[in-house]
Amino acid sequence: MITVKHISKSFADVQILKDVSFVFETGKTNLIIGKSGSGKSVLTKCIVGLFEPDEGEIFYDERRLSDLKPKARKEIRKEIGMLFQASALFDSLTVEENVAFPLNMFTKMTKEEISDRVNFCLNRVNIINKNQLFPSELSGGMQKRVAIARAIAMQPKYLFCDEPNSGLDPVTAIVIDELIKEITDEYNMTTIVITHDMNSVLEIGENIMFIDSGENKWTGTKNEILDVKVKELHDFIYVSKFLQQMKRKR
Amino acid sequence: MCKDNYYCLFWIISMIPAFGKYMTMLYSIFLKPEKFSIYWKRFVDEVIQLGLKSLFIVILMSGFMGAVLVIQTASVIESAWIPDYTVGFTVKQSMLLEFCPTIISLILAGKVGSNIASELGTMRVTEQIDALEVMGVNSIGYLIGPKILASLFIFPVVIMYSMVFGFLGGGIVCYATEIIPVEQYIEGIRSFSEDNFGYVRYALIKTSVFAFLITSISSFFGYFLKGGALEVGKASTKAVVYSSIFILIANYILTQLILI
Ligand SMILES: Nc1ncnc2c1ncn2[C@@H]1O[C@H](COP(=O)(O)OP(=O)(O)OP(=O)(O)O)[C@@H](O)[C@H]1O
Ligand SMILES: [Mg+2]
């Protein structure tokens, strides 16, 4: 469980996050949704400690991030898997080496064990026979999937996915969503998914936070979201004429 | 004049935070590595990347530099009173003391410095450095540490190659053009050999300092880059300019300290 309390963050006098509070629950896929530029990526970077929030507190289960010494922070980070919005694969390493990187760095696994684990993770994201390619030789969607494989390689307790299925075709997008849901259940992880894809929201949105201009405007589940009254969220969901018609029929 | 002083002061004051950041960076390099074997592999990679891949250009430059030095010195010394081996001696002195350590280091600042800054800058822009940090890796230690150590190890070797090929270049010119007899040239290089060890040591000390300056300054500009792809280009230019300036300053100070 990750608890966020009253987080604020500004860049050069522009306030990006305004008093955001939320509880990301264990064993559930927690979604952060919102328009482009609303501060979703900044919020996750605050949570993992890449940005220092100006105000507010972050708790990893019982551990308060700001209380921790650098060493203890490092320990938490080993429990975090993160998929960056632009994949952030190491471009000097092959696909295989990318996924093996955290395993090589932090575990005492043997070569065979690492190789097995890497292939297992790559299989799960449906990347097969691409082990020796470099990230620049992959399509954007494939890079994203390799990055997911790298994020789950260490079996993290906390998984952050910044737009895991943007740039993927609808079929693969659903496969990835289901994969994230599956491993969350399987390993009882605290998973945080950033998305603006309504398909994902309705598929895996067990605990949703809607953020608009840096403010937490609505929280709920996928079952509640279609009947929402909050104007900003309503506008976010029912953008197209088609969806508005669908709503009227319901 | 007063205004110039003011700007100069302002520039120096504005450098202080950057210098603080640079010092913190150097400190982070020496934190305990997560896993030694991985750092060792990184070190070997960097030795190849920074040193061996620069060897060709260094050898080429040194060879031509030696050749040109021989021709120029020989054409200046026309008096019959000055023995021919003076040419060899002059070439030796200038190569060992200045050309190999300083000029080649400036070349390396251009080649290696821009390479380092753009590599790290790209990693910053594409969030690869953030990815390392989130994993719990000491990204400065992992990325920059091996570069600095590798350059401290390999640049002196590169400079020794440069010396050898510089002399060789000069020798080839003597042989081919008979501007002075080859034997005289060799005698010149061998002359006053009791000082040679001191000169080489001086050259290698200088090179090590320059190696440190090039890699650390270029890493600094790449690692702490802010912004996008455009800034990567700017950072690599800055890396080259600042490493060159600091090489020149250090060169002056070291010469004053060691030779005088
Ligand atoms: N490092 C930074 N420095 C300054 N401003 C930043 C920085 N990172 C993000 N911002 C600003 O913060 C705001 C929110 O950015 P963020 O990346 O969180 O958006 P987002 O919700 O993830 O959007 P998207 O869905 O397009 O990824 C933007 O206005 C952006 O300009
Ligand atoms: Mg984003």
Image: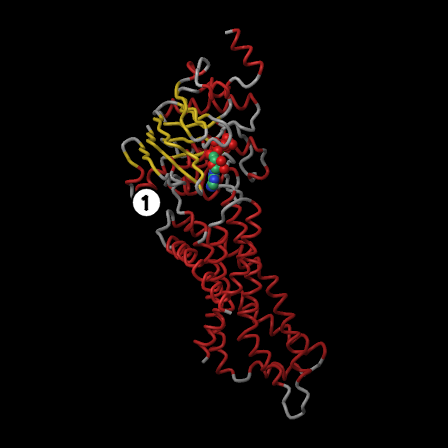
Can residue B184 be seen in this snapshot? yes
Horizontal side, residue B94 vs residue A72: left or right? right
Residue sitting at x 50%, y 20%: A235
In this rendering, position of residue B60 left or right of residue B21: right
Q: State which quadrant residue B77 falls in.
A: bottom right
Of residues A205 and A20, the one drawn nearer to the viewer in this rendering = A20
Image spot of residue B251 (x, y percent): 49, 71
Looking at the rendered structure, the number of numbered marks drawn on it comes to 1
Q: Report x, y in % for residue A103.
A: 41, 39
Q: Which residue is mark 1?
A: A70
| Residue at the extreme bottom | B81
Helix, strand or loop at label 1? It is helix
Residue at left offset 54%, top offset 13% = A244
What residue is drawn where x is 39% and y is 47%? B138
What colouring does the structure picture have?
A: secondary structure
The amino acid pointed to by label 1 is: Pro
Where does the image place residue B153, in percent across and percent down from the top left? 46, 62
